[in-house]
Image (cartoon, rainbow, N blue to C red):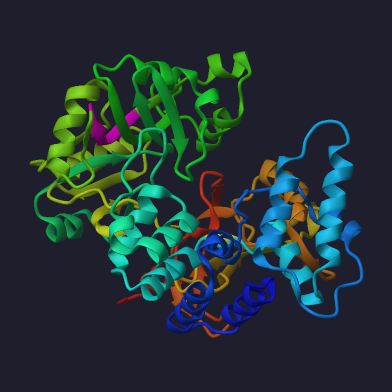
Amino acid sequence: MLLHDVVSASTDLAATRSRKAKTAVLAGLLTSARPEELAAAVAFLTGQPTQGRIGAGWRTLAELRTEPAAEPGLTVADVDTALGEVAGTSGSGSAKRRAEVLGGLLARATKAEQDFLFRLLTGELRQGALEGVMVDAIAEASGVAGETVRRAFMLSGRLPATALAAMTGGTEALLEFRLELGRPIRPMLASPAESLGEALAELGSAVVEYKMDGARIQVHRDGDEVHVYTRTLREITAHVGELADLVRALPCDSVVLDGETLALADDGRPRPFQETMSRFGSTREEQVRALLLRPYFFDCLHLDGTDLLDAPLRERNAALRRVAGEHMIPGESEPADADALLAASLADGHEGVVVKDLDAPYAAGRRGRAWLKVKPVHTLDLVILAAEWGHGRRTGYLSNLHLGARDPDGGPPIMVGKTFKGLTDQLLAWQTEHLPELETHRDDWTVYVRPELVVEIELDGVQTSTRYAGGVALRFARVLRYRPDKEAGDADTIDAVRAMLPGG
C-alpha cells in the first residue's frame, strides 16, 4: 500500500462531516491493506506512528524539508521502517543519523505526503475523536460486530492491534483479548445528569459516591509488581511511590483497581487539582514529602485471578471492600438520604456525587448512562483552538481563548465560544509561554494552535447562536483550570453542549 493511499483517505476524511462517509473511507482502506501494513495504516490515520512520539519537532522537520518527489512511490511499510529506525537511534552521532533518515524519507515524498508526514510527526493529525469512527470502520471491513471490536480495543488499548486481529482472525481473534495485569484498559466514564433526583430515577438500584476533584488512576498489582497509570494510560509508578507501596501491602496476590488520588491539606480538604497533578511528573523528595497522595478506590476489575469486568457493580464493590475497604471512596448503596450525601461531599470540598447502576458491568472506555455525575455547577471540558493577544494590563500575554467542543464523528473541534475570564496571572504567563509550542499559524491578533490542550470551563449555560458552526454559544464562560490529565479525545462533544440548551 502506498502512503499516497493513506494521504488520500485522510483528505477524504477532512472533506466530510458525515460519520457514515468517514467510516466508508476507512473501511475501504482497511480492506485493501495487506496484513503487514494494517497496523501502520491504522496508526497513521488515527494520528500517531506505531512507535509513538519520535522526538522530531516542527523546526527540525522544516530544516530537513527538500524538493518533493514528482510522483508517489513511498509505501506505508517504507515510512514505518524509517520511523522505527529514527525512534531506535540513540547515543553518539544519533542526531545526525536521525536527520539523515528523516531527510531521506521526506525527499521521497510528494508535496501532499510531506505535509501529511509533518502533521503526523508533530502531533497535529492526532485526534482521539477519530478513534470511534475507526472502530466502526474495523467492524464494517471485517464483518465483526461493532461491540466486539469496541471491547477488544478497550481491553488492548491499541487500535492497530485490534484492527489486525479483526481483519485476520475475525470474532475469534478479538475475543482472545483479555484484561492483562500490567496493561491498562480505558477507564469507564460518567455522563452528566441534570439533578440528583433525575439520576436516581433513571438508574433505580444505585450507589451514590463522592465526586472528587482529584486525578484518575488505575492500579495493577501482580505479586510485588505494581503499576500505576493515569486516565490517559500513561504510567506514573516512578512518581507515586507511596501509592505503589500502599497497593503492594493490600491483602491479595493480584488486583486491578480504579479510583482517584489527590493531595490533602492539613484540614483534610483537597488541595488544588494542579498540585495533585504536579506530583505525576516529580520525583523530588521535598515535593513528595509535601504532597503525599491519598487514593480513593471505587472499582475492582480483577482480584486474585478472577476478572470482574463483566460482573455487576454490586459484586465488584464487594470485592473492593474485601481488598481495599479502608481506601474506598465515600459513598452509600441505595442511600436513605442521597441529598445529604451530596451536601456532605460539597461541604468537604469536592465537586458533587456520581450515581452508579449497581447492576451494570464495567464498560471500559465508554461514557454511557450507567454512571451519572451530579455537579451543582455547570462545567465543560473543551479544547483550546487559539488565543488572542491581550489588551491593557494583559498586553503582551496570550489571553482570550477560543474554545471548541469535540466532534463525535471525528471531525475537527467545533468552536462554541471565547473567554478570558478566570485566567490568573500565573495561567496567563503559562499559556503565553506554552501555546506557541502548538502554533499552526497566526495573524495580527491571534495565535492558532493544534487542538491538543483541554481546559475546564465553568458556565451559566448555553444559548443558540449563528456566530459559531455548532449553532450554540457559551454563556458567561470562565476558566477553571487546564486538564493535563485529559486529551482532546476526552473533551465534551458538541452534542453535550447542545444538550445544555433550555429545553434540550
Name the image quarter holding residue 220. Answer: top left
Give me the residue at 60% from left, 61% from top: 126
Give me the residue at 77% from left, 50% from top: 56
Total of numbered circles in the picture?
0
The quadrant the N terminus occupies is bottom right
The quadrant the C terminus occupies is bottom left
| Left or right for 472, reference 79 | left
| Left or right for 94, reference 465 | right
Q: In this picture, which residue range is highlighted in magenta? A: 296-304
Q: Nearer the viewer, residue 59 or 441?
A: 59
435 relative to 289, above or below: below
Q: Is residue 186 visible?
A: no
Name the spot of residue 66 as percent of width and height, x first: 91, 66
Name the spot of residue 429 as percent of width and height, x first: 74, 45
Give me the residue at 86% from left, 31% from top: 92
Name the spot of residue 207 as percent of width and height, x first: 16, 43
51 relative to 237, above or below: below
Name the spot of residue 71 as percent of width and height, x first: 81, 80
Name the image quarter holding residue 61. Answer: bottom right
Q: Nearer the viewer, residue 122 or 167?
A: 167
Predominant secondary structure, magenta span: strand
Give me the residue at 21% from left, 53% from top: 196
Q: Is residue 480 visible?
A: yes
